[in-house]
Amino acid sequence: MLIATWNVNSIKQRLDHCLRFLKEAKPDVLCLQELKCPDEAFPAGPIEDLGYNVAVHGQKAFNGVAILSRHPLSDVRMGLPEANGDDHSRYIEAVISRPGGGVARVASIYLPNGNPLGTPKFGYKLAWMERLRVHAENLLALEEPLVLAGDYNVIPEPRDVYDPADWLGDALFQPESRGAFRRLIALGLTEAVRACDDRAGLYTFWDYQAGAWQRNRGIRIDHLLLSPQASDRLVETRIHKETRGWEKPSDHVPVSARLAF
């Protein structure tokens, strides 16, 4: 089973890219982030025509997450528990019925950016990460294959950024953000890419400004976290860097993990 995640940075602007990726990479499951459209405006038709089931948790002009699956979807959850008035569409979760029997649980996550520092946005980011940690702990108790995939807006380590000094004042690279990410993994999750490739210079995002793509000034903020039942089945991962070179691309590229069931 191939499971991928991609912040498309507007599904309306990147629909052709999404369809091309589905046709070429043929993921069993694709988690999308930053749809920037409400549920009713999501272009489900062309995606369903390719044989995918669609679950969407959208929001007009901002945020928005979706799960596309070749296999049946059930038990769809939109939003994290303990919302307390939080109306951001940043989390969707579903159970995937696997071919041959059994299930896998997959979540698409668009974690808050948190910038600028010194504003309520950073506190919201950290509080959201703690809500995710608590929910993930409850999901792990189910002891089933679980993949928490998405744009985490966290640079885990200095080797995940072209120049750490340039990001010292950014919410994505603060000790508090990185610590919250480590606490999430410490529940018993495996960071799929790092389980397969320990090299520095693996990036999933290149800014549109200052020739970041051309100069390979990237960062790694898109992650797939696996429960023990999923990590035991991890075969390989891939960062689909070629999509950043497509015409009018997203600033993120897909990341995929193949699990053998």
Image: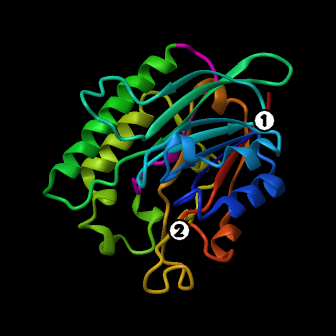
Mark 1 surroundings within 10 Å by alpha-carbon count, few (fewer than 14), some (14 through 19), many (20 or more): many
At label 1, the amino acid type is Arg
Q: Is residue 187 left or right of residue 21?
A: left
Which part of the image, by quadrant, shows the C terminus? top right
Q: Exactly how many numbered labels are in the figure?
A: 2
**For the point 53% across and 85% down, which residue is it?**
215
Q: Determine which residue is flagged by label 2.
A: 251
Rendering coords of residue 190 (x, y %): 55, 37
Quarter of the image where one finds residue 244: bottom right
Q: Is residue 144 magenta-colored?
A: yes
Quick check: 90 above or below 229?
A: below
Quick check: 250 above or below 21?
A: below
Segment tinted magenta in the rendering: 142-155
In this rendered view, identify the residue nearer to me: 219 or 95: 95
Rendering coords of residue 89 (x, y %): 42, 40
Q: Determine which residue is flagged by label 1.
A: 70
Rendering coords of residue 77 (x, y %): 51, 24
Quick check: 49 above or below 244?
A: above
Which part of the image, by quadrant, shows the N terminus? top right
In this rendered view, identify the residue nearer to me: 212 or 187: 212
In this rendered view, identify the residue nearer to me: 199 or 24: 24
